[in-house]
Image (cartoon, helix red, strand yellow):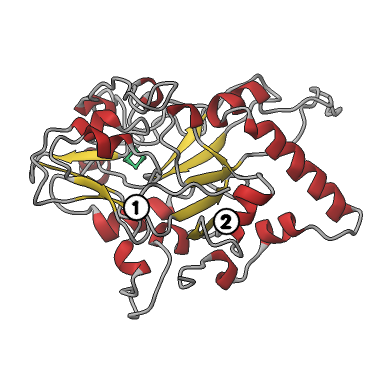
Amino acid sequence: EVRLADGIDHQVAMVMDLNKCIGCQTCTIACKTNWTDGGGREYMYWNNVETKPGSGYPRDWEEMGGGWDEEGEERTPGELQDREDYGRPWDFNHEQVMYEGSDEPLRPMDQAGWGPNFDEDEGAGEYPNSYYFYLPRICNHCTHPSCVEACPRSALYKREEDGIVLVDQDRCRGYRYCVEGCPYRKVYYNAMKKTSEKCIFCYPRIEGEGPDGEVHAPSCAEDCPPQLRLVGYLDDEEGPIHKLVNEYEVAVRLHPEYRTEPNVYYIPPFAPPQHSESGESLNAERIPRDYLEELFGPDVNEALNTIDRERSRVERGEESEVMELLTTTDTEDQYRLEVF
Ligand code: SF4
């Protein structure tokens, strides 16, 4: 059953298949060049792709609090990250290497501290069974958004027509309660404008103001080379998102225990089984289930079991709607934005 927030007609949603992400950051750059290349936005990544296991962006965002308590009624306290958690750009020895004839390799000049993707591809586990996967993240346009509730000026709101969460720039006074209230740390403070800013789900594009004056999916989705994102409405019962999330339950939420009810869902990652140093298969999962449960909650187990079962059906030559939905290359199925 689909639960929409009170007063919302429809809810936009996205499903990201983590098995397809190659960590190329095309989505990050598509978003950045569209929306956050201006002053005061240097560290803003409305879309980022982090390596898991890893600290993410901003650093250790999962330990900063925010969201709702067990009853989903009281907001849990969140802390405000500081500038160092986002990292600072550092200089390279370009001048010496390129113009002064130095034989040194190109390298950072100062002690590099932290930044987006600083721990990229580090991963975890022991050789030869180490593992990592990429986790693309945007604002989840939550059904029960703690950022909205945190704002004493009601500057943040969910759009009635599609549940997109926006910041009214005229009402915002830059108090940053939303920044510390979002457990996913997906609201950013623009110190030049002195207001908070966040992912807008490319609403002008879905309203028909795409580059050719037509309806387009958000640019993070459309520009993704492996096309891992499905975009549509959670309450479109004929659409792939509704089927994957509600019917087959193979798409799960990131950190459901924050209780904001995200509307971005993930197909959890599979990895090849572990093997011995001599190459013998060990019949043990490479990505520990308890780590996946930590990220996606207990529902990840049934999601993985269902996908495994459906894959076996395809291997036996049987039909599987789940696998068809997950492998579709038809853009009309990938992006269903004109149904209401
Ligand atoms: Fe608000 Fe964070 Fe949810 Fe986005 S992800 S709606 S910013 S609580």
Residue 236, by quadrant, is bottom right
Question: Which residue is labeled 2 in the image?
Answer: 241
Asked whether disc 2 touches disc 1, contact meaning CB atoms under 8 Å apart, the reply is no
Q: Amino acid at mark 1?
A: Gly
Residue 257 visible in the displayed image: yes
Ligand 1 position by quadrant: top left
Where disc 1 sits, the SS reads loop
Please state which of residues 337 and 227 is positioned toward the viewer in this rendering.
337
Q: Position of residue 43 (x, y in %)?
A: 24, 40
Q: Position of residue 309 (x, y in %)?
A: 82, 44
Q: Amino acid at mark 2?
A: Ile
Where disc 2 sits, the SS reads helix
Q: Residue at x 56, y 32 (%)?
A: 296
Please state which of residues 121 and 48 is positioned toward the viewer in this rendering.
48
Question: Which residue is labeled 1 in the image?
Answer: 7
Lateral position of residue 334 relative to residue 85, left or right: right
Callout 2 crowding tier (Cα within 10 Å): few <14, some 14–19, many ≥20 = many
Residue 9, by quadrant, is bottom left
Distance from Cα at disc 2 to Cα at disc 1: 21 Å
Disc on the earlier residue, 2 or 1: 1
